[in-house]
Amino acid sequence: MKKFINGKMINLAEPRLGSKVIFKTDDFFASANRIINPDPPIFKEGVFDKHGKWMDGWETRRRRRKGFDYLIIKLGRPGKIFNVDIDTSHFNGNQPTYASLEACHSNKKLNVKTRWIKILNKKKLKPNKNHNFKIKNKSIFTHIKLNIFPDGGVARLRVYGEVEIKKINFGNKLINLTSVLNGASIIGCNNEHFGKAENILAPGKGKNMGDGWETRRSRGKNFDWLIIKLGRTGIINKIEIDTHHFKGNYPDRCSVQATYIPKKISNYIIVKKSNRWRSLLNKAQLNANKKHSFKNKIMKKNKINYIRINIYPDGGISRIRTFGKVIK
């Protein structure tokens, strides 16, 4: 079954982008840094530390005076925010009653004069639940402030949007066109049962097998695929398919298709027509736990802004990198 993912939706609060918690009023029970952990929150039955029950998230002490708790996250890359997920998984009876969000754009150190803009009014929170809210303000922000009323615990905060793409003259420099740091995003995939598709665009090496894109065992003649919108339109010189950490579950083979779409069209149409795109890389054998490099010999002079990677029949890939020159 096809799965469609909004191509603009990447988690701007990801530590892999350089995002970090820079202030919190309190984190007595559970470290504020855990709130931006990209992994799903877990529960450790019967595990306690010196402050009480160990919880996978940010948890403040019980407030005995007026006021509320909050934390501030500096986004690794400035961007527009479309949706947020305030996740109270495993917090049941100790979740905040309400939460709100503010944001700002600042290239300087924050202070009392920093102008915060409310992007999400006070919302009721329920225990052990993902709370998804649309954000209407489409300004570019650098910092997020999560307010919780009056205290309590939040497992994760995910801030979905798109990275601000600055106009940079790269000249003849080769860059990774499929890096999330350069604005690349996932348009769609048919399956991401064990590992999120967005992981394939992350910078650096995968930290483990969970830090990649991995599909379920297909048990049939079908194959799996995902589609990437390049961060910049370019001419691709080299393709890297990295199966780092995937040893008994890497795909047997892969192929890559590509195209250039000059105008904005729906993700649904892009996915529907993608199987007719030109071949950028014919079916190639893959090996376990290895970085595979392929020269672009087929579309050497073609302008490209979308690629589709097909894996046969299923399995996991840590990263895909396409190095090329940016063109207008």
Image: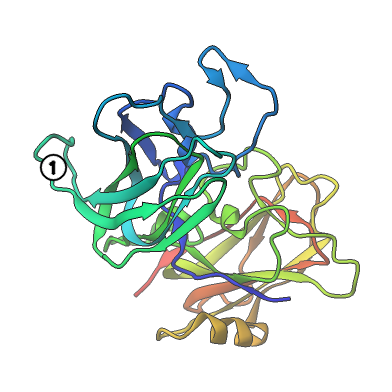
Front one among 102 and 125 = 125
Front one among 314 and 161 = 161
Residue 175 appearing in the image: no
**Residue 264 point in image, percent of width and height:** 41, 84
Residue position for label 1: 114
**Residue 309 point in image, percent of width and height:** 66, 69
Dot 1 crowding, Cα within 10 Å, few <14, some 14–19, many 20+:
few
Task: Please say if 4 is above or below 195.
Answer: below
Q: At 63% from the left edge and 45% from the top edge, which residue is drawn?
A: 211
* Badge 1 element: loop
Type of amino acid under label 1: Thr
Classify residue 203 as left or right of residue 216.
Answer: left
Classify residue 199 as left or right of residue 81.
Answer: right
As drawn, which residue projects farthest toward the top?
50
Q: At 68% from the left edge and 53% from the top edge, which residue is drawn?
A: 195
Q: At 58% from the left edge and 72% from the top edge, which residue is drawn?
A: 307
Instruction: Write down the quadrant of residue 209 in the picture.
Output: top right
Q: State which quarter of the image contains the C terminus.
A: bottom left
Instruction: Write down the quadrant of residue 161 in the picture.
Output: bottom left
As drawn, which residue projects farthest toward the left?
113
Front one among 286 and 4 = 4
Task: Please say if 225 is above or below 50.
Answer: below
